[in-house]
Amino acid sequence: MKKSLLAIAVFSLTIIGCENKKTTEKGTTPTEKPTLSSMTYTDHHSFSKPNEAVVKHLNWVATVDFDKKIISASATYQIENKKGVDSIFLDVRNLKITSVSTDDNKDAIGFVVNERADFLGGQLAIPIDESTKSITINYETTEGADALQFLDPEQTAGKKSPFLFTQSQAILARTWLPCQDSPGIRFTYEATVTVPKGMLALMSATNPQEKNETGVYTFKMEQAIPSYLFALAVGDVEYQSLGSVTGVYAEPSVLESAAYEFADMQDMVDTAETLYGPYQWGMYDVIVLPPSFPFGGMENPRLTFATPTIIAGDRSLTALIAHELAHSWSGNLVTNATWEDIWLNEGFTVYFENRIMEEIFGKDFANMLALLSYQDLQDEIVWLNSENRSADTRLRVELEGRNPDDGLTGIPYDKGFFLLKLMEETVGRKNWDKFLNDYFNEFKFKVMTTDSFLEHLDNNLLSQNPEWEKTIQPRKWIFEEGLPDNCPIITSTKFETVESELAKWTNGGEAKAIPSGDWVTPQWLHFIHLINDTLNQKQMHELDAAFRFTQSGNSEIKAAWFEKVIPNNYNGLGNSVEDFLVEVGRRKFLTPIYKALLKSNGGLPAAKAIYAKARPNYHAVSRESMDALLTNK
Ligand code: BES
Ligand code: ZN
């Protein structure tokens, strides 16, 4: 039933930019650069029909109302009517549309919304004719705007001003902007946003660096972006520059520690450019959001949104910044055509992140990160298999009739990373880096499907040596389940040290005697992951007393420790698990901790009681996942 409905909903698209009269053939002469055969694909998650009429530019005029917790806006779109059709179709969900007009029909015109009660929302059909150049929609957001989180002052660091942030990826943009909400459709935008005086508004665009008297801020995004990168944050935030194109925004009480933590940002941008070509977006700034932000980071162009939980005080969690920065190439520049191709965004980005980290912090450090990724990957495959979701262990996932969020497992990240690492090892770093540089350059501001990527890979890399394809077997990685047996093996002497020290302790050694003075965060994470679930209170106390895990200012260490102390019924915790779950809304931390609670003796009522308290603090993204985990249990 659901399936057949969806079949009408989706669009199929031939990308003109990649259209080629001649289909690529294997035997093309070297002087004639092979080009892609035309790219056709179906996005199961958009009702728009961009090959008929498409949005090219948006002028967004909006007011943020913190009392009503809504945005009211007027959106004017420059459109291109490609086929002389009589309607343009946009995605909407839970929006209150008050009026629609066009440049050639200034009076309010009729429009149709067919909305379903699920994550897809509905199709807004607006009548146009061949000569229509622009349409204007006046609308308000509602309580059902899942992209938005309006925070009360108590949920911020300063406790004085409210806060608003958005999270559009994957298909939440349609809950605060009528749009053609498909990653393959790009538009430029300008915006005028009015907020209460004393607050600063920031977008994925050119940004102000200080507050003004009026509370009215203007923005421009001159590079075309897909809707999932449309973003807004409003709060009592200030700016500090960190380098020629880098800087950080945070609430005043957080700004100094944020600037300290991200001191390497300019170096990261410079390094990324040396690796894979020019940074195309002008500024690269980061905003540190309140702790309910549901992700670690989000790569909104020119302004990465970040969780405050990466501020550890010792710059040890900044791989996340390298990751979001890397998306400025893999994702924001060359964009996955649909959410089924998300490994093209995330896998490439984890690989690129690892290369940035290697350049700045050395091979040993990058290796440790890669090994943690390998362990996560193995755990993820075991878990997906146990949930009867083996099909989701393929790099290219099938999401027809499903929420794109279902495809957001560790697979596109970690399996994607290891496929790229295997390519690097097989063809040699020099060839691989040249291939990637050319790839980002050739497809910048364009869309990529898994099939087109494979075709491009064959033509531009694998064709150079018949052995490479056989060694790598990319199609096996992409279309088959599980982890192929040619996965690169990573070793780390730094991790071996951790393993032998833990073994000594398990065999009766003293925790205090472990020579851990120079251990870095990945080593501590490895140490904690290896602690087994059958320790006694004395042993748990000994570890905690020696290394102060429960009190750690490092959120990754703390969260990993909580995953161990719950099954070990450690009684030295006080309210720390509850306090953490109530304060932090980052889904990556919530899921494993709630899961550990559910599994433990008498943990179900405890988990439910904590969740009842914490839920009002969570963004819709985390709420939805935790509801699925905890209700009807
Ligand atoms: N773009 C993602 C977050 C995302 C993906 C949101 C899909 C919604 C749908 C972001 O770049 C990301 O991967 N964040 C990770 C960072 C980590 C891998 C370093 C996170 O939030 O944990
Ligand atoms: Zn990412």
Image (cartoon, grey):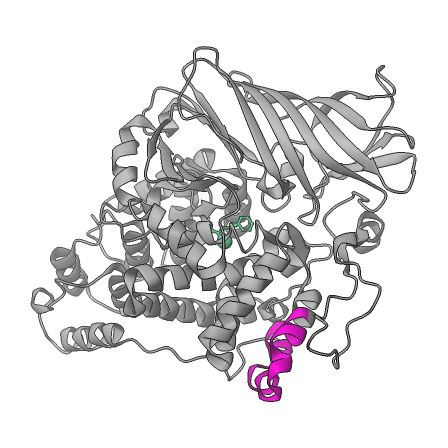
Position of residue 37 measured from the top left corner of the image (x, y, whole percent)? 78, 66
**Which residue occupies 76% across, 39% down?**
116
Q: Residue at x 23, y 45 (%)?
A: 313
Query: Closest to the observer: 541 or 400?
Result: 400
> Which residue is at the far top?
213
Residue 323 screen position, x and y as percent:
44, 54
Q: In the figure, is residue 252 to the left or right of 202?
A: left
Q: Main secondary structure of the magenta part?
A: helix
x, y percent for residue 554: 26, 50
In the rendering, at what x and y percent does residue 81 appear? 85, 37
At x 73% / y 79%, what residue is drawn? 29
600 in the magenta segment: no
**Magenta-colored span:** 456-478
Q: Nearer the viewer, residue 184 or 124?
A: 184
Can residue 556 be seen? yes
Any magenta on residue 458? yes
Q: Give above or below for 209 relative to 197.
A: below
Seen as rendered, the residue at the extreme front is 31
Q: On the image, which quarter does residue 438 sit in? A: bottom right
Describe residue 16's horizontal placement relative to residue 581 as left or right: right
State whether residue 115 appears in this view: no
Q: Is residue 566 left or right of residue 303?
A: left
Give the total of numbered labels.
Answer: 0
